[in-house]
Amino acid sequence: MSALTVSQDPDQNWDDLVRYWEEMEWPEGSKVEIIEGIITVSPAPASRHNVIAARIQRRLYSVIPEDWEIFQTLAIAVPSRLGMLIPDLLVAPLQECEEAESHIPAALAELVVEVTSKSNAQHDRVSKPAAYATAGIPLYLLIDRWAPGGPTATLFGEPKGDVYRVLSAVKFGDPIKLPDPFGVTIDTGEFPVD
């Protein structure tokens, strides 16, 4: 099943869009995001997708400070890009997130991780990094299972405007190192390949 988009009034302002996103009853287990002003409903990710996220999460837990947390379903808002995004993994200060009702400002994130799904990989490659960079999120790790040349892991950093610089890019099987404050190496050889 692929992602669906929900039509809404093109003249709708950000607050109305967020209210609709918060108040609508969406299908159980689906991932509902606002990407460039369009509400996108995606099915729950496949098992291999979850295995990759879980392996990264396990490595991150060994290095993050006690007052940070890793979230799998917390939305981050980027109003300037008309985005309410739910990264596969989000590392942010725990106290800031505990006080949130439905989402936090994206600028609070220290790292976001996206694992592509076949049906909406383009969002993870184009729209989401532009929003994450705009918000000033220091690091973005893209695990692209569906990259044209085969599965890859790319670490982006040093956001400027809506663009990141590629800090490292590897094919599955090679390690990728996250810089400080994480200072951890992730073995992409542990990731299942489709």
Image (tube, helix red, strand yellow):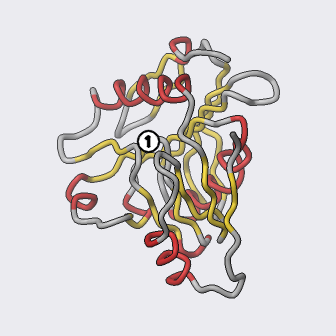
Q: Which picture quadrant has residue 12? A: bottom right
Residue 57, horizontal then vertical, whole percent? 38, 30
Mark 1 crowd level (few <14, some 14–19, many ≥20, 10 Å Cα): many
Relative to residue 123, is residue 47 depicted above or below?
above
Q: Nearer the viewer, residue 133 or 150?
A: 150
Q: Nearer the viewer, residue 73 or 185?
A: 73
Q: Which residue is mark 1?
A: 89
Relative to residue 70, is residue 105 depicted above or below?
below
Residue 180, horizontal then vertical, whole percent? 38, 37
Q: Secondary structure at mark 1?
A: strand
Which residue is rendered at x = 62% and y = 34% of the image? 154
Residue 9, horizontal then vertical, whole percent? 69, 82
Residue 4, horizontal then vertical, whole percent? 69, 54
**Would you say 92 lies left or right of 80 here?**
left
Q: Residue furthest right?
A: 148
**Would you say 138 lies left or right of 4 here?**
left
Which residue is rendered at x = 19% and y = 47% of the image? 67
Q: Nearer the viewer, residue 152 or 41?
A: 41
Q: Quadrant of the C terminus?
A: top right
**Would you say 140 lies left or right of 122 here?**
left
Relative to residue 23, is residue 128 depicted above or below?
above
Which residue is rendered at x = 54% and y = 57% of the image? 32
**Would you say 53 lies left or right of 165 here?**
left
Q: Which picture quadrant has residue 56? A: top left
The number of numbered discs placed on residues in the rendered structure image is: 1
Which residue is rendered at x = 65% and y = 29% of the image? 169
Q: Quadrant of the N terminus?
A: top right
Q: Amino acid at mark 1?
A: Leu
